[in-house]
Image: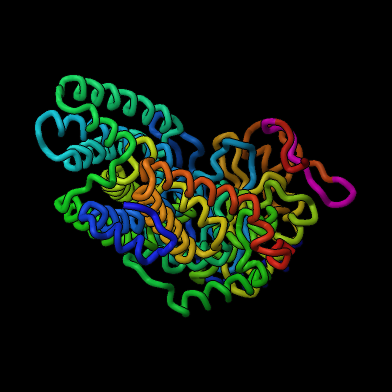
Amino acid sequence: MDISESETRPQNAEPVLVEAENLTAGYPGRTVWREANFNIKKGEFVAIIGPNGAGKTTLFRLLLGLKRPMGGTIRLFGSEPKRGSPRIGYVPQHHVIDEESHIESMEIVRLALSGKRWGFSLFSNDDRKAALLALEGVGAAELAHHPMAELSGGELQRIFLAEALVSNPDLLLLDEPLSNLDMRRERDLLRLVNDVVRTRDVAALLIAHNINPLLPYLDKVIYIANGKVASGKPGEVLTSESLSALYEIPVEVLHDSRGNLAIVGIEGHHGDE
Amino acid sequence: MGFSLNLAADLQQMWQYQFMQHAFEAGTMIAIVAGIMGYFVVLRRSTFVAHAYSEIGFAGAAGGILIGIPPIYGMLLGSIFGGSSIALLSRRSTHRDVYIGIILAFALGLGLLFLSLYTGYATEAISILFGEILGIAWGDVVNTAAFSLIILGGIALLYRPLLFSSLDEEVAEAKGLPTLFIGVAFLLLVAVAVSIAIQVTGVLLIFSLMVTPAATAQHLAPRPSRAILVSVMIALAVTWVGLFVSFYSPYPASFFITCMAFVLYVLVRVFHHKIRGPGEQKG
């Protein structure tokens, strides 16, 4: 990945969806991370990695308008993030699926479209069609009438992805969708997210523990650890030099023969799991 | 009066009595309301809350008897007051069950005090605790109708946001739904529903109409609108049959209602996979 190639890439011309300037996040009395500067453009696939508790989900809460910055600014679609933006599709980390309820998958997708409307409706056909279309888009049309409680982890993630995509968002926020998936399902889901990003020109922010399975697809990485945030192309950010400079301690990025990398020196290993 | 094998004649005989007419009128409305509300109670895993409301309602009813107002108003006041305090205290708290338990125990203690202060009939206490649908007066029927309309109107208005925030609260909140308001509004409707359902099942057997039919229904229908319909049909069936059987037997209606709801639930759980068939298994 050399510099002349990246200059000619068309994504530089894409509109900026998210722009953070000296952004500081935290709670009264505790700063989680400070002075982050990054932007996210339309159609970019971005991984957010870092140790547990580093404040990855906090970034999502800022974008969703569920939380205000402690300092600096964050702009989303050109203005301050506000709760309830229809241009964001969100998949939270913990979905509680009731084992006892036999609600079919399509219902949650349909509600992501019409659940905000007050009043009763015995479901317009347009809603159902849109929900089916969203399920087809993630290769889950045949799961539409299956009870969610009977689906596997990978199948559920597809349903949640359809739920997030049904309102045709410009930005997808996926909070650890790969946890609880085995390697094959993990790869399948990443391919699917990548397809969605490329074909729909939607930007995706994906929180993960392990960056290695993501490396082939990523446009950008946001690395959050020890109260600091680094961002840029994976090959530029995740190097011993740039991380050591940012953290002012010796950080090593190790590569194995298959191209996997591991970051050593910041709260132990992560990346390699 | 005697039971014959001629169903039409039996029904005709039963409906000659005004108290049976009132029982069927109130019972039908309550079954519809309980079947609908029960679905959301089960979906939101709020069964303990519903139980607490009914016991707080008991304290209210006992207090009502003591100061001479109809038990249903006392119940309503009690469960709405307890309902809003539980809803606000326990928002998203992991100690929700603890808060509910504390308020519930306090309410039951109050109820006991009110009953012991009241020197009238102890049968009042029994009918609040276990239901006395055969004692429903015309005024109770009118009250039940009014409260049923309020509940049905409330649920019709809340339906989609309530369903969404029950199924996927985090996404609903991110999408800008007022999930706290929806939760509190729902619990207030539960409080009203419990207050009227107590007339049929009593405080202690409230689950037989508010939980069991809905829990059975959600195994039978994968779509919420249909599950609600099935839940209502089960609640109606057990109420009607329970009233009919109790008229011709010396045992209370709430016993038969509880029993049938339970047996139906067990049957559905046991034969559930056979009903749905192998074609619907996950591929």
Residue shown at 51% from the left, 71% from the top = A168
Toward the right, the furthest residue is A257
Examine the structure image and report whether residue A259 is included in the region drawn in magenta. yes
Residue B31, visible in the rendered structure: yes
Residue B137: where, in percent of width, then height? Answer: 17, 49
Q: Which of B148 and A231 is in front in this view?
A: B148
A8 sits to left or right of B23: right
B82 sits to left or right of A111: left
State which quadrant residue A106 falls in: bottom right
Residue shown at 90% from the left, 49% from the top = A257
Toward the left, the furthest residue is B68
Residue shown at 28% from the left, 46% from the top = B133
Q: In this view, does A85 lie above or below A271?
A: below
Residue B16: where, in percent of width, then height? Answer: 24, 59
Q: In this view, does B207 lie above or below A116?
A: above
Q: Nearer the viewer, residue B210 or A197?
A: B210
Q: Is residue B123 above or below residue B153?
A: above
- The residue range painted magenta reads A256-267
Residue B116: where, in percent of width, then height? Answer: 20, 20
Residue A73, visible in the rendered structure: no
Residue shown at 33% from the left, 36% from the top = B130
B24 sits to left or right of A138: left
Q: In which quarter of the image is the C terminus of chain B?
A: bottom right
Magenta: predominant secondary structure element?
Answer: loop
Q: Which of B228 and A33 is in front in this view?
A: B228
State which quadrant residue A114 falls in: bottom left
Q: Nearer the viewer, residue A18 or B172?
A: B172
A148 sits to left or right of A61: right
